[in-house]
Amino acid sequence: MKKVFILLLLSFIDSIYSENLKIIFSTGLSGNVNSCLCAIVPIGGLLKRGKFIEDLKIDSKKSILIEAGDFIGNAVPKDKFQAIYEGLNSLNYSIVTLGKNELTNLSINEINKIPNLVIGNINLKDNSIPKYKLILNDKIKIGFTTIYTNEVFPNLTEISLDSPKPIFETNEKIDFWVIQFYGKKENLKNYSKLIPKKRIILLSGDTNLDSKNSVINLAELGKVYANSGGNGDILYFIEIDTNSFQVKSFQQKRIDTDKVGDSKSIQKIIDKFEIK
């Protein structure tokens, strides 16, 4: 009985000091800055997503907000690209990564001209883009990076499946990795030996086109968390215990375009760039 009491006490103490980290990620904005309340497929755009995020009152010390690529469309004027970037910055996104739309339609020079655009790309050939992003939590150091595959981006990537050390070798001691995988999910297992054990994997872009579920179980890697974008109107929430590095909860929320209002800060950016 005494032993049971001690175990319960230790569990209670651990729950008091245990802190959770929230990873919130979105994708597939596809250049939609304004909302479009169309009858068939309404789109909230950055205008309504901004209000949705502002209402969450996110604690930046305990949360990581990630835009996981494809935030521009197939052909986006440069002023609209700049407007989207400024909008994501104003909403305090921690990470903005490149998707297929960005890598197809923008040159590396165009990307590098935008100040403070943070992109973690572990295996792009161009070394001017950061390989990873370090996020300092109150308690732990979190590394973020993206792995692209040749199946989706031919001639853009070079990666050796036999040499994992250089890929995740950093000057910092990183406690936990957030790894975005942009490719076909059936090929993710090929990278299992490269990926650190203390990590969470987010699947983006073409990865989830053939998957109905947001949580996929892969024998080599366990649970991975996929997204389909939902025209940029779905946000995914993952809560992680920073002591055990275990996922405590996962949920997705779709923005109700009828109920969510417009973000005043995003509207100012729309007016500044005269986005129609």
Image: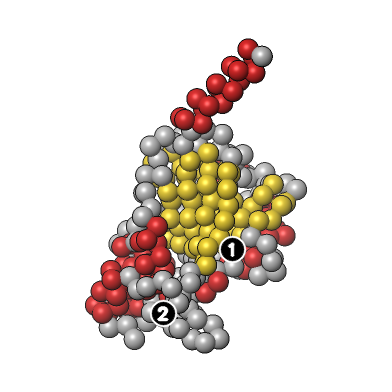
Give the percent coordinates (x, y) of residue 194: 63, 45
Which residue appears at 52% of the width and 47% of the height?
239
Q: Amino acid at mark 1?
A: Asn
Any mark on residue 203, and which? none
Mark in the foreground, 1 or 2? 2
Label 2: few (<14), some (14–19) or many (≥20) C-alpha neighbours in 10 Å: some
Left or right of 245 on screen, residue 48: left
Of the pair 103 and 265, the residue shown nearer to us = 265
Quadrant of image for the N terminus: top right
Where disc 2 sits, the SS reads loop
234 vs 199: above or below: below
Looking at the rendered image, the quarter that the C terminus falls into is bottom left
- Left or right relative to 276: residue 7: right
Residue 75, percent from left and from top = 45, 82
Q: Residue furthest top?
A: 2
Q: Residue at x 37, y 67 (%)?
A: 51
Report which residue position mark 1 lands on: 227
Residue 124 on image: x %, y %: 51, 59
Q: Nearer the viewer, residue 254 or 116?
A: 254
- Is the residue under label 2 in contact with that under label 1 (CB below 8 Å)? no
N-term-proximal mark, 1 vs 2: 2
Q: How many badges with numbers are in the image? A: 2
Q: What is the x, y in percent for residue 173?
A: 46, 34
Residue at numbered disc 2: 35
Residue found at x 24% / y 77%:
272
Q: Quadrant of residue 202?
A: bottom right
SS at badge 1: loop
Q: Specify few, some or many for label 1: CA neighbours under 10 Å numbering under 14, 14-19, or 20 or more.
A: many
Q: Is residue 149 left or right of residue 272?
A: right
At 39% across and 41% down in the image, what residue appears? 136
- The correct choice, above or below, for 157 with respect to 171 in the image is below
- Amino acid type at mark 2: Ser
